[in-house]
């Protein structure tokens, strides 16, 4: 990702692209005099005096959030308000490329070459950005100062994962008029461009998220080394049957619709085998919670219990029942199965 110097880095790369392109096309020879390429505010430019010469200016007039990437990642914080992540600030940069001449047709020639260069270079390559921000001998003839170049070397603009794209951004007469009125400068031949996308990432430290899960299931002794514990891992089944104990039905004696104290009841379902079966009773109305052990018989699909004849502990009511069991190969009981009622 880039940092806060990336905006200035894009401007410097555009300026260098136009400056090098004008030299490669020998525009200086065509104009008959030297051409200056700058990146300053239009209201500070003065084309007058004995040393005046044609000038091409790149001016950043607006920076807007990139619509495609602005909400890709949102800042996340923990319950204490500490930052957990640093999502990038995605920006589109809007530029004016303006040509200044001191005699007939010079501005038109400069603007034509500039638009041709930007048309032929719709994307700033990473090598071009590195060359622009790390020149062997930074210019001092009215351009960016060497100290600025030294700072821009740390922008990391060439290392961001999105490349810099240059796109014409037509502006109608009203928009252009309002913009130049706000600048408070005399209008000159101008072309507007949008450069995207610049990704600026915060350098604030981010606290780590919750630690990862280290084990899945109870730990058991290794088959190869009894002194080393290993996790049981994830249970994988070849069907859609849940891998946890579940009650599907309750069978009462003599096809009764209610159960009496002292009766034997049978819970049917799947994955009910194991040890330490406990029948859990819950009467929400009072509330009362009771447990019945041991099971009379237990298989993978059915578990039977004999209910104790204890009226004081089991008042009449609509009970919810669940089964607690230690599954084969496990050391801790499952909290409970699903709840059923009778």
Image: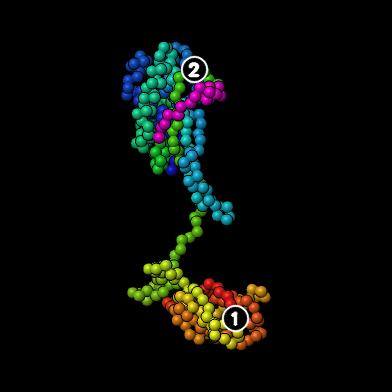
Magenta stretch bounds: 165-182
Helix, strand or loop under label 2: loop
Q: Residue furthest front?
A: 255
Question: Residue at left 51%, top 47%?
Answer: 74
| Residue 139 at least partly seen | yes
* 11 and 281: which is toward the camera: 281
Nearer the viewer's eye, disc 1 or disc 2? 1
As drawn, the label of residue 110 is: none
State the residue position of label 2: 46
**Relative to 305, residue 71 above or below:** above
Q: Nearer the viewer, residue 193 or 290?
A: 290
- In the picture, the quarter occupied by the C terminus is bottom right
Q: Is residue 19 left or right of residue 326?
A: left
**Picture coordinates of residue 148, whole percent (x, y):** 45, 32
First of labels 1, 2 by sequence position: 2
The N terminus lies in quadrant? top left
Tell me if residue 165 comes above or below residue 98 in the rendering.
below
- The residue at 47%/16% (across/down) is 47
Q: Toward the viewer: 51 or 99?
A: 99
Crowd class of label 1 (few under 14; some 14 to 19; many from 20; radius 10 Å): few
Q: Position of residue 77 (x, y in %)?
A: 54, 52
- Mark 2 surroundings within 10 Å by alpha-carbon count, few (fewer than 14), some (14 through 19), many (20 or more): few
- In this picture, is 43 found above or below 212? above
Foreground: 89 or 133? 89
**What element does badge 1 sit on?**
loop
Q: Residue at x 41, y 17 (%)?
A: 108
Residue 146 percent coordinates (x, y): 43, 30
CA gap between label 1 and label 2 equals: 100 Å
The percent position of residue 8, horizontal first and vertical second, equals 46, 33
* Circle 1 residue: 258
């Amino acid at each position: 990702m880039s940092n806060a110097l990336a905006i200035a880095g894009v401007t410097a790369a555009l300026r260098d692209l136009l400056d090098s392109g004008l030299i490669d096309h020998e525009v200086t020879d065509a104009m008959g005099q030297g051409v200056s390429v700058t990146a300053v505010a239009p209201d500070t430019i003065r084309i007058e005096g004995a040393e005046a010469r044609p000038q091409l200016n790149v001016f950043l007039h607006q920076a807007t959030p990139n619509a495609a990437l602005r909400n890709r990642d949102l800042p996340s914080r923990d319950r204490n308000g500490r930052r957990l992540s640093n999502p990038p600030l995605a920006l589109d940069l809007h530029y004016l490329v303006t040509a200044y001449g001191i005699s007939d047709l010079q501005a038109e020639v400069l603007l034509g070459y500039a638009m041709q260069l930007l048309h032929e270079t719709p994307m700033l390559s990473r090598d071009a950005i590195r060359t622009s921000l790390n020149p062997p001998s930074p210019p001092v003839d009215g351009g960016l100062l060497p100290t600025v170049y030294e700072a821009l070397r740390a922008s990391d603009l060439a290392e961001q994962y999105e490349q810099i794209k240059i796109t014409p951004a037509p502006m109608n007469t009203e928009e252009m008029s309002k913009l130049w009125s706000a600048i408070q400068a005399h209008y000159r031949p101008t072309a507007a461009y949008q450069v995207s996308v610049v990704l600026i990432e915060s350098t604030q430290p981010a606290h780590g998220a919750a630690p990862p899960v280290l084990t899945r299931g109870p730990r058991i002794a290794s088959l190869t080394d009894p002194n080393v514990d290993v996790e049981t891992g994830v249970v994988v089944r070849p069907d859609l049957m849940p891998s946890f104990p579940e009650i599907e039905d309750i069978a009462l004696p003599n096809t009764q619709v209610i159960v009496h104290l002292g009766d034997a009841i049978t819970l049917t379902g799947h994955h009910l085998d194991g040890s330490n079966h406990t029948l859990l009773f819950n009467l929400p109305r009072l509330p009362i919670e009771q447990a019945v052990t041991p099971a009379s018989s237990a298989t993978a699909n059915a578990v039977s219990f004999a209910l104790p004849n204890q009226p004081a502990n089991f008042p009449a009511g609509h009970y919810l029942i669940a089964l607690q069991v230690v599954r084969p190969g496990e050391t801790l009981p499952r909290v409970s199965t699903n709840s059923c009622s009778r």
